[in-house]
Image: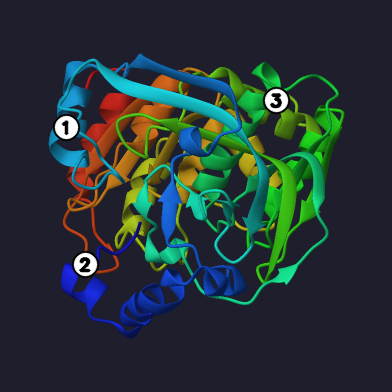
Amino acid sequence: MARVKSGFRKRFNIRYWRWQATHATIGKIGVLRRRFSFYPKAVHPAKAATQILEDRSFDLPTLFIPEETAFVRDKCWPYDTLAGDWAGEPTAKARQIAVTIRDAELLGHVGLIMTPPHQAVVMLQEGTANWNFAKARTLRQDPPIAGRCHFLPRTDNYYHALFHDLVPLVDYLERLHPRGMPLTLVCTPARLAILRQACALLEKAYPGLRTVELAENAKVPVEEALWLSFEAGNAEWNFADAAPVHRMAEIFRDHYGLPGGSGRRLFFSRGGSKIRRLLNEDALFEIAKAHGFERFEARADNHAEQVRSFSEADIVIGVHGAGLGNLAFCRPGTKMLEIFPENFTKSTYLWVSRHIGLDYHWVVGGPGDYDQAFSLDETIFRQKLEALLRHEPT
């Protein structure tokens, strides 16, 4: 989520009204729904399931100290995605689900599973599917996929690829998947090459896996679709156990042949990103540089260096954004200082840090504009950084 749109802008645009017209016509006639793969109804995976592999509800400790609890409750909750009714308790209600759905269909244009008995797409939010996940389109039908398969949704967000797609899959492979049982990973074309690379690495790590690609203009019937999900206080809190995160990191490190290392101090730059640009980044970097920090920027062609840099870092400074998903590769105990604009504070990486053993800190700058470009007071940054380096509370 980058720009927050008003209700007026969401409702009064041509895409919204085109969808409403489609819902009122094609959505009401079964033969047309099937012809154009338009399924505006959503069903919960537990209801769509043929077999339940795991469905557990439990109280999950947040691991927040009181100051962090107040920060999340009072500052982050308005910006956290799908924030629920958590009000600062030391635990959050969590539900972890792994089910299979037989004789389903994978839809490339929306990246979802469709279950024919319900004539609905499978989503955690039941009822009418969000209009981004119900689109009318004539799709090519690909040959059926036999056996069990897992659909990796289309995403162009690096953090979501790591923590929403890969971590749950690794968790399933480590705990629930019968060893050697065939499993087909289905990917849609995405701008993130990392997702396709990860599937290739998982094929090497887990015998029986193979990967196929489903084009955006195609659909495919499958014998058994696997659904994995984790629900807690909000969509930012998306895993319970550090083990699959560390296992995923190990698979990438082994692939890149990275030796162990430490001692680096990273000032993680968003570079030329239009969203959440730190307007006085150069001035802040000069302050950090005096304490031994190096500036590092993630690019599509330097993933090996991303994994290496975060693996070797003792301290990471960075503005909130998808690139901080690389915290998955940090060693336990690594310090993290996250920078926010005043009007966009999220609990994503505080949650990640607490659950994989990182030492998390934050600092809030001035208000961001429509693109969330903002500045951070240099004195406040210097004080925060120096206190962090002295191992003092901030």
Visible in this render: residue 338? Answer: yes
Q: Is residue 180 above or below residue 237?
A: above
Q: Residue at x 73, y 54 (%)?
A: 221
User: Closer to the camera: disc 2 or disc 1?
Assistant: 1
Residue type at mark 1?
A: Arg
Depicted 31 relative to depicted 213: above or below: below
- Earlier sequence position, callout 1 versus callout 3: 1
Q: Secondary structure at mark 1?
A: helix
Q: Write down the residue under mark 2.
A: 369
Distance from disc 1 to disc 3, alpha carbons, whole Å, reads: 34 Å
Q: Which mark is residue 173?
A: 3
Q: Locate residue 241, reporting x and y percent.
A: 50, 18
Quadrant of res 36: bottom right
Mark 2 or mark 1: whose residue is earlier in sequence? 1
For disc 1, the marked residue is 73
> Looking at numbered disc 3 in the image, what kind of residue is underneath it?
Leu
Going by the image, does 58 lie left or right of 266?
left
Q: Quadrant of the N terminus?
A: bottom left
The crowd level at tag 2 (other Cα within 10 Å; few <14, some 14-19, many 20+) is some
Q: Position of residue 324 (x, y in %)?
A: 47, 43
* In this view, 336 is above or below 56: below
The residue lying at 38 percent from left, 73 percent from top is: 23
